[in-house]
Image: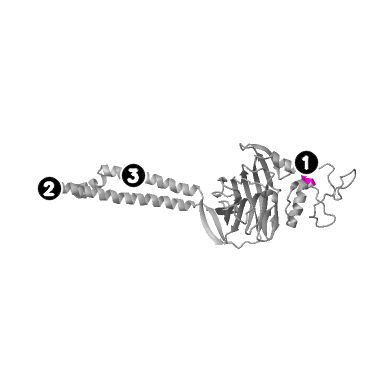
Amino acid sequence: MEILNKLKNLDAYPKVNEDFYNRTLSGGLITIASSVAILLLFISEMRLYLFAATETKLIVDNSRGDRLHVNFDVTFPSLACSLVSVDAMDISGERHYDIRHDIVKKRLDYLGNVIESRQGDIGAPKIERPLQKHGGRLEHNETYCGSCYGAEVSDDHCCNSCNEVQEAYRKKGWAISSMELVDQCKREGYLQKIQEEQGEGCNIHGFVDVNKVAGNIHFAPGKSFHQSSFPFLDLFAFQAEHNISHKINKLSFGKEFPGVINPLDGAQWIQRRSSGMYQYFIKVVPTIYTDIRGHKINSNQFSVTEHFREGNFYPKPPPGIFFIYDFSPIKVIFTEENKSLVHLLTSICAVLGGVFTVAGIFDSFVFHGHQAIKRKMQLGKQG
């Protein structure tokens, strides 16, 4: 007891008490700031723990023989559906002209409202008593075999519709100068259908299955044919100026994955000069996205540049829009990962200890500085 009484009488005890328990305005402000900092850092650590973080890795793409879907949704406000054809070709030699499967065309009025929707060009009227190869009309119980107008590949080759005649000409690399001379087209009302759709627009959406090699997909007025490794259009496409103004509602390569940005979604171009070829040069980057459950999504990202070739230069480019794509040799891998509970607890302890340490140092610096200034002021008054 005597030792405790002597310690109480020492000057050190009240000094320690004063240093640690003296309430100051600066100490209160530092305490409030520290509490706010701890709360914000705690919320940040909880967000990192609850929500998955995505890690990125780049590797060389050595995949071979893959195929992918090119998904598109394109609107032509001033081009009729009966004129627009979709073609695809690549450097491997695979070519598809006037693609109709997996594609839906919607006729639009001048306000953009849907008039009619159909799968490809399904719905052409049936020909009654059509023209035979020998020149006569189809009689009762007679098997029809329409003329291909010189584009037959064999004696028994028949072209029973306007589209089949055009397909035969495309395979030969020829162009049809006048649809009125083709009986199948005349009886199907091909030209009348085009005239009826004048002033209309068209929305085309669907997908094209392509090889994972460089190639192009183009939307053009008229039917394409192939010659000398370059796409041409039949002469009908050049008989008038076509307005290829367009809006790309959607364009993607492969499946969608979280966070993907397709730079052409919503892109729009208005033709203000003569008709021509609008080109999109696309660099496709293969991408693998792995979610938190380990589910992988094989997809692609892409970047794009644009160029317009006017049609009043020689050689005259075919009108339309061309998506010319190539693939990057680098593959991007995105992986979702969650932080462990141990990492969360360690981070929270580090936050608490770090904030308290910094706040203590700062408070000690302010307090002792204030005390030093106060003593100097007192000494100045005494002097």
Whole-percent x and y of residue 369?
22, 49
**Relative to the observer, which residue lies in front, 275 or 259?**
275
Point out the frontmost of discs 3 and 1. 1
**Numbered disc 2: secondary structure:** helix
What colouring method underlies this structural image?
A: one colour
Q: Is residue 23 visible?
A: no
Q: Is residue 216 magenta?
A: no
For badge 1, the amino acid type reads Pro
Upstream in sequence: badge 1 or badge 2: 1
Alpha carbon distance from label 3 to label 1: 79 Å
Q: Residue at x 74, y 43 (%)?
A: 190
Whole-percent x and y of residue 95?
69, 56
Q: Mark number for residue 204? A: none
**Numbered disc 3: secondary structure:** helix
| Start-end of magenta stretch | 183-187
Mark 3 surroundings within 10 Å by alpha-carbon count, few (fewer than 14), some (14 through 19), many (20 or more)? some
**Relative to the observer, which residue lies in front, 77 or 21?**
77
Whole-percent x and y of residue 153?
80, 57
Question: Can you identify the residue that label 3 sits on?
Answer: 33
Q: Residue at x 26, y 47 (%)?
A: 20
Query: As drawn, is 49 to the left or to the right of 100?
Result: left
Upstream in sequence: badge 3 or badge 2: 3
**Numbered disc 1: secondary structure:** loop
Question: Can you identify the residue that label 2 sits on?
Answer: 380
Whole-percent x and y of residue 110?
62, 37
Say above or below: 87 vs 24.
below
Say above or below: 77 vs 303.
above
Question: Can you identify the residue that label 1 sits on?
Answer: 125
Count of numbered tags: 3
Q: Main secondary structure of the magenta part?
A: helix
For badge 2, the amino acid type reads Gly
**Relative to the observer, which residue lies in front, 339 or 66?**
66
